[in-house]
Amino acid sequence: MLAAPTRLQRLPRKLEEQLRSKHESDVEQLLPVVGPVLGMLMIGFGLRDYLIDPEHAGQTFLLRVAAVAVAAIAFWRTALRWSPTQRAGFIHWVYASALIGVSFLLKGGMHYGLVTISASIFLVALASLRISTFLWIASGPFLLYTVLSANDTSIIAYLNDIVSYFFNICLALVLMLMFRFFREKAFLLELQLMHVAQHDGLTGLYNRAHITELADREIMRARRHHRPLAVAMLDIDHFKIINDTYGHGIGDLALKAFADACRGCVREIDQLGRIGGEEFACLLPETSESEALACAERLRACIEALGVDTPKGRVQFTVSIGVAVLQPEHANWECLLRDADSALYQAKCEGRNRVVLARPRSSVLAHGLDAA
């Protein structure tokens, strides 16, 4: 289980992709809300243009309106097929470039407009999650400002403005890294809570509630695509004797060793869960009857060869397994599991340490009628 970070770190690739996907989803929801606000601010600040340079205020107003119109296409996914972060970057480029253009048209506007232009970069800190993305978004407007403001003021004022703009970019980058840290911490804590909610605390296998949720999903998929599905129900033989003889501590070690051994014997697509005490279920998607029996036999042999070293000697145990294959008459997961449990009970009655296949209900019913 992953611990919450105490500093910025590079997540494993899979977790990084999950974090980025979650961030993109949040940015997607934020864009339509932020859009109208930015548009109103963009046009509303046209009053300042009139106070600075009434002669060119009409031109700058048209430029502001044009920027709002162009940026509006990026606030909804239907307009551009880019990712939310790419669309946020496009919006910043349009607005920041328009503000720089407005400042360029006004007399002395490059200096007066610096506060608004450089302040817009702080919104990028919320939209980006990586340094490379942040720099990609921030670099375009900064280079445009550097070029257009070169002849607008004295060299001292020019250098002062460039340094101020660059300083704001650095502050925004620090803000982005802080945001990334807290976002990462919340993400990993969420994963921990999800892991606790879905897994058995002792063995680390799925708990009964989650294996039921997965099974319902797999049954729907199997029926929709007409694919085979099987379940194996496992019960450790004479587990009470292990607890009574060696103590519950050793019994817990045996359960952990059992779970680890089962993980090593199944495929990546198979799902293992603890459904109570020493009873376990293994969900086997894309598995025919013969394949399910082969898997169950592999599990049985693996557990038979397993041993747990204790101060009182080496503990060995076996497992009985009941296998059921999804049939049309299985209304849901509980029905399928019930058949596997019946086969497990038969395995116990026949001497334990064996695999028994559940007979389809239709054949059981036909056998009953013949006997009658």
Image: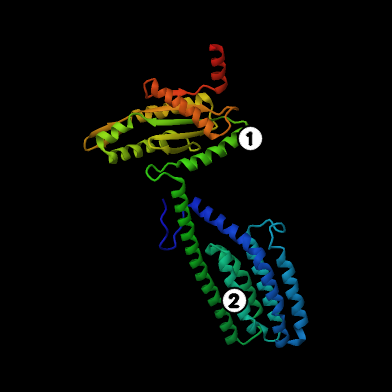
Q: Position of residue 247 (x, y in %)?
A: 26, 38
> Residue at left 48%, top 27%?
323
* Residue type marked 1: Arg
Does the rendering let one see residue 354? no
Residue holding disc 2: 119
Which structural element holds mark 1?
A: helix
User: Residue 126: image x %, image y %?
Assistant: 56, 66
As drawn, the residue found furthest toward the front would be 372
**What amino acid is at disc 2?**
Ala
Could you tell whether 198 is left or right of 141 in the image?
A: left
Q: Residue furthest left?
A: 312
Q: Which residue is mark 1?
A: 224
Q: Position of residue 303 (x, y in %)?
A: 36, 30
- Nearer-N-terminus badge (2/1): 2
Question: Does residue 133 appear in this view?
Answer: yes
Decide: is 161 above or below 193: below
User: For this rendering, which residue is in front, 171 or 45?
Assistant: 45
Rendered view: 346 above or below 206: above
Q: Is residue 259 left or right of residue 29?
A: left
Q: Quadrant of residue 109?
A: bottom right
Where is residue 324 shown, x and y percent of the image? 50, 27
Question: Could you tell me which residue is drawn at 53 percent across and 12 percent down?
Answer: 371
Occupied quadrant, residue 311: top left
Tell me the number on the disc at residue 159: none
For label 2, count other residues whose C-alpha is less than 10 Å away and answer few (under 14), some (14-19) or many (20+).
some
